[in-house]
Image (tube, grey):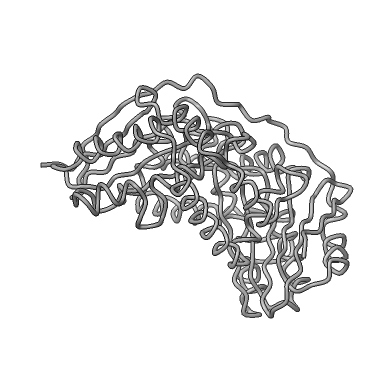
Amino acid sequence: MAYQYYILENGIKIIHRRVSGNVSHCGLMVNTGSRDELENESGMAHFIEHMIFKGTKKRKAYHVLSRIENIGGDLNAFTTKEETCIYASFLSPYYQQSLELFADVAFSSTFPQKEIAKEKDVIIDEINSYNDSPAEMIYDDFEDLIFRNHPLGRNILGNIESVKKIRRNDIFRFVKNNYSTRQMVIASVGNIEFRKLIKYVQKYYGHIKNSARVHERKEFSNYASLHLSEKKDSYLTHALLGNIGYARSHPQRLALALVTNLLGGPALNSRLNLTIREKYGLAYTIEASYQPYSDTGLFSIYIGSDKNHIDRSIKLAFRELKKLRDKRLGSVQLHRAKKQVIGQLAIGFESRLSEMLGIAKNHLHESAVKSLDQIIQEIEAIGAGEMLEVSNEIFTAYNMSSLIYTARE
């Protein structure tokens, strides 16, 4: 069944796909994340994502958390650079309870002062735990290197000093300035009639006042490559190489995703894995990734290796990039690359929770969301010439930045 759409008068969008089954998935996603923070608000979006579960005008924290979990459901939330999402998986008869709770925490949270103090300690512990993991920390530090002096470069968690400075009035101001009804999507993949879903949405969200974002996003520009190396107390040496990539709306976004998957996707037969790990045994972990944003993107290669092997691993990674720049893929290679990524997409769509979160994000930016079949058609249409063009634009050695965490002696 195709996706069904509806828009409330206040601008909140709804997207739904009805499926059979006992379990349904629903979420409220807003087009606000850490990149929407001002310089003195670092970590605010993530802090608010924690705080919305700490009490509303009619519920204490215990009752918020119990509303879904008492019926056997799973309630969760996350914050990214550009989105914040509340979502749940639950037995299909409990749509109304779930939608009512999302509305309550999203629009009626009171952010109690005593809970703010407690949650600061929780998030500071989260930051400290994160700092103990160089393999995770290097990704955010690399984005800070690539997007330096821009909100996209800031860590989603913020830092200990910025979290300590958060005040209750700051939270209310950030919510008012950034959480716009015209930047919200309610997404659903589950066993409910669309008419009934709209009835519930109208009941709990229809009265919400139409609001607009106060601060517009600062677009990223003026990228320049940079290379940095730091000593870390770790056994492995960690390295990230990369360049800016295409924005979410770029016509060659799928081509870059396809060539990135061929180079270092999750499959064990990726070019980087076969060369650096399987052939030479130089790295424990080697992978490539591409993250599109609304106005730019990031392509990167991660290598986790012994300090004695890191230089050769990086050299081999650049050699694989050069091959993609210099030589057009043959028809058999291109066919295999497409089939592999199509299979990965199809497997991903088997998870209805992942589908729900995916269509929520896509509907924030598009009036109509593409089906799996439409995405597959677009992938099949990508030619070897386009792959070569993308590789020469993104994988140029002189334009790559690098960040290396070198293990101490």
Q: Residue at x 58, y 58 (%)?
A: 77
Rendered location of residue 350, percent (x, y): 59, 67
Q: Looking at this view, is 155 or 138 the one in front?
A: 138
Q: Residue furthest left?
A: 409
Which residue is pictured at 68% across the width and 39% down the height? 178
- Residue 52: percent from left, percent from top: 63, 56
Q: Quarter of the image containing the N terminus?
A: bottom right
* Position of residue 380 in the picture relative to residue 192 (left or right): left
Quick one: 10 or 174, which is closer to the camera?
Answer: 10
Q: Quadrant of the C terminus?
A: top left
Q: Is residue 312 above or below residue 76?
A: above
Q: Nearer the viewer, residue 307 or 55?
A: 307
Residue 177 can be seen in this image: yes
Residue in view at x 89 percent, y 48 percent: 9
Relative height, residue 69 to residue 185 (above, below): below
Nearer the observer, 156 or 173: 156
Q: Position of residue 309 (x, y in %)?
A: 16, 43
Question: Could you tell me residue 270's position as x and y percent?
Answer: 37, 51
Please give left or right for residue 161 compared with residue 74 in the image: left
Left or right of 326? Residue 393 is right
